[in-house]
Amino acid sequence: MELTVIGHWGGYPKVGEASTGYLLENEGFKLLLDCGSAVLSQLQQYIKPSQLDAVIISHYHPDHVADIGVLQHALLIDKYLEGYEKNLPIYGHQEDEIGFQSLTYKNITTGIPYKADEVLHIGPFQISFIRTIHPVPCYAMRILANGKSLIFTADTAYFLDLVEFSKGADLLLCESNYYKNMENAAVNHMTSQQAGKLANLAQVKSLILTHLPHFGDHQQLLQEAREEFPADIKLASAGLKITI
Ligand SMILES: [Zn+2]
């Protein structure tokens, strides 16, 4: 499978870039992971919104879902201009009723619930979930295709069960909203050091730090994570493509 970073900023997008959004492709199937602020704009650098086959949402914070409404507008306009005929499935949990309802729009998109304890099949992808530590219900995902595995932590504080969940993954796409010395602040998000520790304990093959902060020097995040996981680590960046 191929991963393209559409947006990697925590909280809000930096000028000309986007907050959380990743395009995951396998066997021609195009799945969007989260649809944060400015994702729709940035996605169009790679594909047309009408080419998406499915979307999955980790939680309903604006930096992960802000562009769901404009994605729906784009598909509606495409219906009139180009004859868009699909009804795009958008997978989300149902623990936020208003958030879940927002995934359904006319005959353009349909919200489909996923359950934490059930494996979800979307196209060629097999997805399992673990609830994270965050102020609102949020799920990390283990995504399998062609015998390869991607862990997307979504938003979370560090917790031990995430190690078992991430065990042996080919790629850990891990949030790193804080620097090492900010562990006291990291009650809803992880530090660079914790991301490295998770990668090390879970014995993943490679690590990408994402959900990056709007302060400090990101090279420092990389160094701090590398102290724990002296292996393949990258910082997420707009347009970064990784074949898993
Ligand atoms: Zn969040």
Image (spheres, helix red, strand yellow):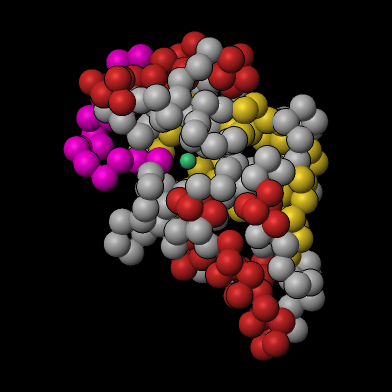
User: Is 141 or 2 nearer to us in this picture?
Assistant: 141
Q: Residue at x 41, y 30 (%)?
A: 189
Give x and y (percent) for residue 50: 66, 70
- In the rendered image, the vertical position of residue 176 relative to residue 64, given as above or below: above
Q: Quadrant of residue 218?
A: top left
* Membership of 136 in magenta stretch: no
Residue furthest left as drawn:
216
* Membership of 227 in magenta stretch: yes
Give x and y (percent) for residue 33: 59, 48
Q: Residue at x 52, y 62 (%)?
A: 67
Q: How many marks?
A: 0
The magenta segment: 211-230
From the viewer's perspective, tell me whether residue 118 is left or right of residue 69.
right
Give x and y (percent) for residue 150: 60, 33
For the N terminus, which image quadrant? top right
Q: Residue at x 56, y 19 (%)?
A: 162
- In the rendered image, the vertical position of residue 196 relative to residue 8, given as above or below: above
Residue furthest front as drawn:
97
Q: Residue at x 29, y 62 (%)?
A: 15
Q: Quadrant of residue 132?
A: top right
Give x and y (percent) for residue 106: 75, 72
Residue furthest bottom as drawn:
81
